[in-house]
Image: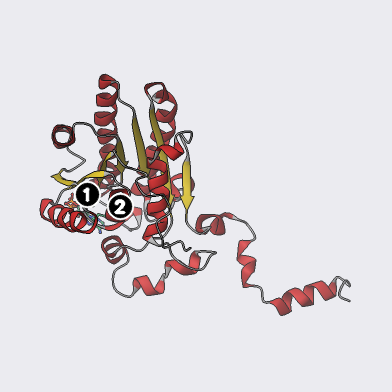
Amino acid sequence: MSYTEGMLKEGALKGKNILVTGGGTGLGKSMGLYFLKLGANLVITSRKLEVLQETAQEMEKETGGKVLALACDVREIDQVEKMWKDAVDHFGQIHAVLNNAAGNFISPTERLSTNAFNTVLDIVLKGTSQVTLTAGKHWIKEKQKGTFLNIVTTYAWTGSGYVVPSAAAKAGVLAMTRSLAVEWAKYNIRSNAIAPGPFPTEGAWSRLLPGDLVKKFDPAKKVPVGRVGEHQELANLAAYLMSDFSAYVNGEVITIDGGEWLQGAGEFNNLDQIPQELWDMMEASRGKKG
Ligand code: COA
């Protein structure tokens, strides 16, 4: 068995209709594909209908499942409400929402225009809250149970330079996840989050670290387990949190980053760089070396 394999048993998501925002490419596509393999039907949304339709076709061919592609900019409430209505009209009921759509600019904060800063806040925080409120109000009104899974990041709680609007917005999404986990549990609505570390995707990585930068700042070097994540590892965790196997998990954020953020947090972790010979010398100087 390997971490590149699917983890849940066949049919683990059978009968579930799952909405994935930002589901046409990257991590959203990988998680959605695994949901389909486990028997779910899928609604995928993003701004680019053509990309979505291509992905939907590809996914249906690979799995035999049903995928509905709906264009929706999560920043626009009219589009969100229309998308939700179309999704419900098509499948009858949506059981779970994966809030995965995001945007990010890596930049010194003082170089960001007001519009650039607001663009990231709008996609990540406003977009997630608009999708969440639209789905949640519907579930409450119809007395249907529901599951939210929100993709955040490990710097949602530490903050991070050079991605400040993203850090601020993801911190908001995390607070919303935990708040609604309590407030809406009485309606049978669960909310959880995943904080992924580096998982390579063509789109985000080439945009965020263009050209040789990705070699210079090789993210694998910052991860204690010595590698970046495999999409299937993230998909396994997401599928578990979407499934009824996790019915008692509510308000949790699960980090999946090979220990990356703790590596940066532990005060003495950079002592990794001290060679064994130096440790030997220090031990000898304490007079303990036999
Ligand atoms: N760094 C800094 N500012 C940037 C930028 C960058 N790389 N790219 C765009 N901006 C600025 C623009 O100049 C504009 O500000 P201005 O009006 O003051 O000039 C503002 O940000 C909005 O840019 P615009 O291109 O009009 O935004 P958009 O709404 O069309 O698209 C995104 C914004 C984020 C949706 C788009 O860049 C995108 O699709 N990104 C891919 C998704 C992504 O980032 N994924 C990573 C997930 S972690």
Nearer-N-terminus badge (2/1): 2
> Which amino acid type corresponds to the residue marked 2 in the rendered image?
Lys
Considering only vertical position in the picture, is 110 above or below 187?
A: below
Disc 2 to disc 1, how far (Cα)?
8 Å
Residue drawn at x 44%, y 50% is 155
Residue 141: x percent and y percent? 26, 20
Q: Nearer the viewer, residue 62 or 163?
A: 62
Snapshot quadrant of residue 176: top left
Residue 221: x percent and y percent? 48, 69
Q: Quick check: which quadrant has ligand 1?
A: bottom left
Residue 50: x percent and y percent? 10, 55
> Which amino acid type corresponds to the residue marked 1 in the rendered image?
Gly
Q: Which residue is mark 2?
A: 37
Q: Which mark is residue 65?
A: 1
Q: Farthest residue toward the left?
A: 50
Q: Is residue 187 rendered to the left or right of residue 77?
A: right
Q: Is residue 275 rendered to the left or right of residue 114?
A: right
Q: Nearer the viewer, residue 36 or 211?
A: 36
